[in-house]
Image: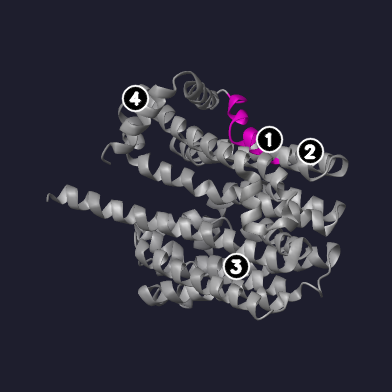
Amino acid sequence: MSHADAKRGSNFVNALLYSTESITALLFSVVSVALIARHFGPENLARYSLAQSVSTLFIVFATLGLEQFVIRELARNKNDSEFVTSALVGMVAGWFAYVGLVVAYYLVFQDFARDLILIASVVVATAISKVLFIRSYLQATNTPRPIALASLFSRLLSIAYLIAGAYLDFSYDAMMLYLPLQAIALFIGMAISKPQFFALIEFKQFNPRRLLISVREASPVFISTILYFFYNQSDILIMSSLLDANTVGIYSASIRLIPQAAFLGYVLVATFYKEMDKRLLEDKDAFESYVKSILTIQFGVGLVLATGVFLTSDLVIYLLYGERYAQSAQVLAIACWAWVFILPAALYSRLLIMLGYARYELIKMLIVAPLIILLNYLVISRIGMLGSAVVFVFSYFLVDFLVYFLFKETRYLGLMGWHAVVDIFTRPRHVVRNAYVLLKARA
């Protein structure tokens, strides 16, 4: 076997390991929410969903928007103690700000005393999984095996805890401890494999100027992430203020299933990224043709997934949550069509960076966020959860497809997507054959 073939095999194994981690994350999320929903009912699921939404809304304050920059810097120099220490100190300070914002939201809008254990479980899990960024270190050093194994073990442990809790009739607060339990088990599993990460943390190496430079570079990501999560979580937040807890629980049971399939888009981007980058440097026409082919696959997979779930939404909800959530099937039958736009979103975001158009990530959020928040308020107050499900799909259509037609520089990206969708319906045999050739080709 040649060196090139050996390297190709290694990359294939790594891709499988990364995919394994994503699949276990999907299954863990679906199973854990299903167990909580079945055992405690829609009202308590609403409490859980709201806590997750509030945490997601403010989580960028804990990470400072530095996650991708951490991977970049450590990929360039895995022994950069100054950067690791500076970033960690900054994120710890950011985590305290994040906790303060979460607590403030509950003090103003919710019952803080009732949900104290739930809030503590969520923010502690965030500190362990996001602020202590050993996972990013492993990704930067291309060491996926510990991530996959630790993820599998920690999630199986947490599921076992939830099943035992349901059998032994644990209280709601006791069941919520599965969140920090999973985060701790995951962290320990990864830490055992790379103890040298901790040797990089030397407080004498802390450089405030280095931290400030990184935060300044990440500021567009920081702002766009705030806007994204602000509108992305606005449905749950607004609904919890306007409608009863039972409705919020029924709605969130379906809506939280949709983002779980987003990893398929990232896997497809990772699979074709190297060849895509090569064609961009060599031949723009070949690059655009290649991108259109990838978009065809992503739109096609999204359409297949959406169609399948649309036709079986009643069965999916019954199997996951039981009869108490029957109304949730209507929400799922609408919301699943967001997959058509969620899967290509990963490619579009990567294209903006590759082509030097990263500023449009922020611009499109500035345009979309206020509109979606306003629409959510109007439809939830007048129509209810089904109207919010329609806005949910529209938000992804707007931010991950239609918005690209608004700007001269990105319009051709939107047109590539449009032509890809047209090909799916007018040239299905060609699309299937082309997808087979792309997927069969060697990296």
Q: Which residue is mark 3?
A: 126
Front-lying residue, 40 or 74: 40
Q: Which residues are magenta?
A: 392-407
Residue 394: in magenta span = yes
Q: Residue at x 75, y 64 (%)?
A: 41
The amino acid on which the numbered mark 4 sits, given as a three-letter code, is Ala
CB-based contact (under 8 Å), mark 3 and mark 4: no
Element at badge 3?
Answer: helix
Q: Which residue is mark 2?
A: 375
Pointer 2 local density, CA inside 10 Å: few below 14, some 14–19, many at least 20: some
Residue 324: in magenta span = no
Q: Which residue is mark 1?
A: 394
CA gap, disc 3 to disc 1? Answer: 30 Å
Picture coordinates of residue 185, whole percent (x, y): 49, 75
User: In front: mark 3 or mark 1?
Assistant: 1
The amino acid on which the numbered mark 1 sits, given as a three-letter code, is Phe
Q: Which mark is residue 286?
A: 4
CA gap, disc 3 to disc 2? Answer: 30 Å
CA gap, disc 4 to disc 1? Answer: 32 Å
The amino acid on which the numbered mark 3 sits, given as a three-letter code, is Thr
Along the polypeptide, which appears first: circle 3 or circle 1? 3
The amino acid on which the numbered mark 2 sits, given as a three-letter code, is Leu
CB-based contact (under 8 Å), mark 1 and mark 2: yes
